[in-house]
Amino acid sequence: MTSKATQTESVLKYQQLRVVIVGHVDHGKSTLIGRLLYDTDSLPAGKAEEIEKVSARRGAESIEWSFVLDAFQAERDQAVTIDTTQIWFSTALRDYVIIDAPGHREFLKNMVSGAAAADAAILVVDAAEGVQEQTRRHAYLLHLLGLRQVAVVINKMDSQGYDAERFNEVAKDVVAYLQSIGMTPQHIVPLSARHGDMMAGRGDHMDWYQGKTLVEILDSFEVAAPPVARALRFAVQDVYRQNKERIVVGRVETGILRKGDTLFFSPSGEKAGVKSIEVWPPQENKVEARAGEAIGITLDEKIFVERGHIASHEKNQPMLSNVLQANIFWLGQTPLAVGNSYKIRYATHEAMVTVQSIDRVIDTQDLAQDEDGAAVERNAVAEVTLRARHMLPIDPYIDYFRPGRPVLHDRTYILRGRRGELDS
Ligand code: GTP
Ligand code: MG
């Protein structure tokens, strides 16, 4: 028999925490990741020596840990991170996926898609430069995307002689900005990505800091539990015919779907019972499917079902509305304007919406608000009201994480935002 503690440990071991690294250009995100891999013994054999040689050859003053990431992507020539890169590493506790987001303004879109998939974030701030434009913007986006587990790293402490006063100064600025947007960082850690102080070990220079190291902070974050306890949402992906059966395929986004349940389909309003749950490889007597599972179901009645429909229980249905408020982050080349139409997509649902009004435009730098904006420029954050041609099944963002975070498309990918808390 295994003890309770060992069981918990082995469960944790299989959890994978997704962490996005964000921050202003050159503040040391890639260096931090390279060093993190080194300090947690996650680098392949010989890699550290190779990096040391390359660094020396290129005349770097010390080991350039950001070169580690070159193995994963072609950033050597440009020497900037051009796309998000995913890197795997593990601590004694569990496995991690690190998402390296670029700090350049032009690459905000990549940062947003990286952050949208993360459980936690590390905001890297250069101790010499302090809070900069992308520091503010990235922080605002983390907030907009609903990321609650955020650690702030005040990096390059070596360049400031590991000075506690400088740390306090920069930390105060960061906290002031974060609080102004309603965010509270769980941890603020002084660190040197180059030399490794406060990364896995504490180093010899910052005895004045009593908090956790970065690795201890990461290990203290929690993997989001699959939303099993929420009301059922089954997003229909497709309907297949197999022999004489019709199989409705999709993903259980939240809640639990059971054989024998009566399902209510939105927006059609039709109902049918679940005759069987089909999975691959086949499982006999599959009686329930939980949040996160991709399944097929057969129904006991021939109702009209198609891609985009959302199945729920009758008691706890999504709202139907053709008007929705959204907090958006606009990434389009051309401004979003009143009267323009866009395709909105969330879960498997797609629909055309028209911008009815732009209610607020927020400048992420100084948080100034423009109440009668006629257009939303690229990289701006706004509250807008959208009108759809047909009724859409919608849920508040807070309750239904994935389906609640819609994407608007122009011809190119345009927007990721969060829908307003419609019924709160
Ligand atoms: P982008 O991907 O372009 O946004 O940059 P980045 O944030 O990934 O920065 P990167 O890791 O490439 O580091 C930028 C520069 O800062 C490099 O020259 C690093 O050597 C230097 N640097 C990073 N961390 C430290 C540190 O802890 N101390 C010192 N002194 N320099 C550092
Ligand atoms: Mg980088």
Image (spheres, helix red, strand yellow):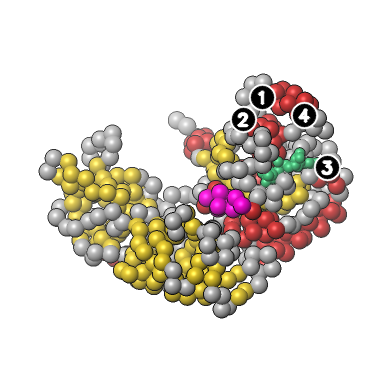
Whether label 3 lies within 8 Å of ligand 1 gets the answer yes
Residue appearing at x 66%, y 69% in the figure: 367
Per the model, the C-alpha gap separating discs 4 and 2 is 16 Å
Quadrant of res 33: top right
In the image as oriented, which residue stretches furthest toward the left?
244
- For label 2, the residue is 71
Indicate the amino acid at tag 1: Lys
Look at discs 4 and 1 and give the one toward the viewer: 4
Residue 61 included in the magenta stretch of the image: no
Secondary element type, mark 2 = helix
The answer to whether the residue labelled 3 contacts the one labelled 4, judged by CB atoms less than 8 Å apart, is no
**Residue occupied by mark 1:** 47
Q: Residue at label 3?
A: 158
Can residue 288 be seen here? no
Residue at the limit of the structure toward the front, as seen here: 334
Secondary structure of the residue carrying numbered label 4:
loop
Whether the residue under disc 2 has CB within 8 Å of ligand 2: no
Residue at figure coordinates x 56%, y 39% from the top left: 86
- Picture quadrant where residue 179 is located: bottom right
As drawn, the label of residue 58 is: 4
For numbered disc 3, what is the local secondary structure? Answer: helix
**Image coordinates for residue 213, horizontal then vertical, percent:** 71, 43
User: What are the residue bounds of the magenta stretch?
Assistant: 106-113
Secondary structure found at label 1: helix
CB of mark 2 within 8 Å of CB of mark 1? Answer: yes
